[in-house]
Amino acid sequence: MSNPEDMPEKLTDAQLDALLDSTGSDLLRYLQATSDTSTLLSAFLTADQTTLETPAALYDEWATRQAQAAIAIRALARGLDRVGNSASDLDSALARALARARDFDHALPRDLVRALDNAFDLDLKLDHEVDLGRALDRARDHARELIRALDNAFDHARELALALQLEIDREVDLVRAFDLVSALGSARASARDSARALDRARDLIDALSGAHDLLPNSDRTISVQSWHRLRKLAEGQVDASGADLRQTDVTDLSLLTNFIWSDETLWPPGTKQRIRVRSRELRPGVYLVRGGRSTRRGSKRFRGTGADGVN
């Protein structure tokens, strides 16, 4: 998974890739399954106010909110990290289409080449966006313009293929021409998928922005810096001792890495034994969920911890 500190302040191609893949019913499902967005954000941003003198009942409620918020943020972060694959496939398809179009430059209409060049130019216009909400809006508009450009390119390529079929004496490789049509069609389909993904991502950002009243001195957008802070908190050690997580989706046990839990923690039916196998015992009745790789010792914790890593 990408380290948030490694992400630049300005929106790069890699960040755009990350935004395009943050699709998903699975992300919305995690948020809906845990708690409402206002409660999740409130749980994180009030973490420093919790003390060891908190009554037991309030402590258990806080532990529940904290654990649910961490799971939701981790799921969202992993969805964003998976964006690069489909976006890279789209870029590769466009690059191949452009290369083939240039092979037929003497026969392709000028506006086909211009449309493809403009499509790539549109990719560069998002590099200077910092605000996540505005970047998503512009990315969605860019995807729609790209679809229109690819529609035009596809029509021109199809007309060219038909013309080449009628003028066989020009000895042009029809197979390659139709391959170009196919590549452009695939790129157009990928662009449509990306546009739908951006719509879903915009809905998710709007949902997170709706909790702004809980954040001091905040506006109605979630900045990249705020997202880095939430993600860093969620990936740290989470104390879920005594938390009630029976209504939380924990099917993906990797989302529980670095969770501290106790015998009093309530899990969904049929999951406690799986989680116990994945955990190591810190002291009698208190456990730490292990991950697939070693955990950084410097991870930020949600509450102060002792020398053994637990409260």
Image: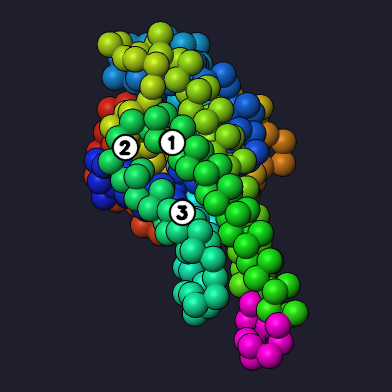
Q: Which label was assigned to residue 129?
A: 2
At which x and y percent is residue 221? 38, 22
How is colour applied across the structure in the image?
rainbow
User: Which of the two labelled residues, at mark 2 and mark 3, occupies the earlier sequence position?
Assistant: 3
Give the residue pinned by disc 3.
119
Q: Amino acid at mark 2?
A: Glu
Q: Quadrant of the C terminus?
A: top left
- Front residue of 168/186: it is 168
Q: Amino acid at mark 3?
A: Ala
Q: Which residues are magenta?
A: 167-178
Q: Is residue 65 visible?
A: no
At which x and y percent is residue 153? 58, 59
Q: Which label was assigned to residue 100?
A: none
- Front residue of 181/248: it is 181
Image side of residue 302 versus residue 34, left or right: left
Q: Amino acid at mark 1?
A: Arg
Give the residue pinned by disc 1.
138
**Please, what secondary structure does the residue beneath circle 1 have?**
helix
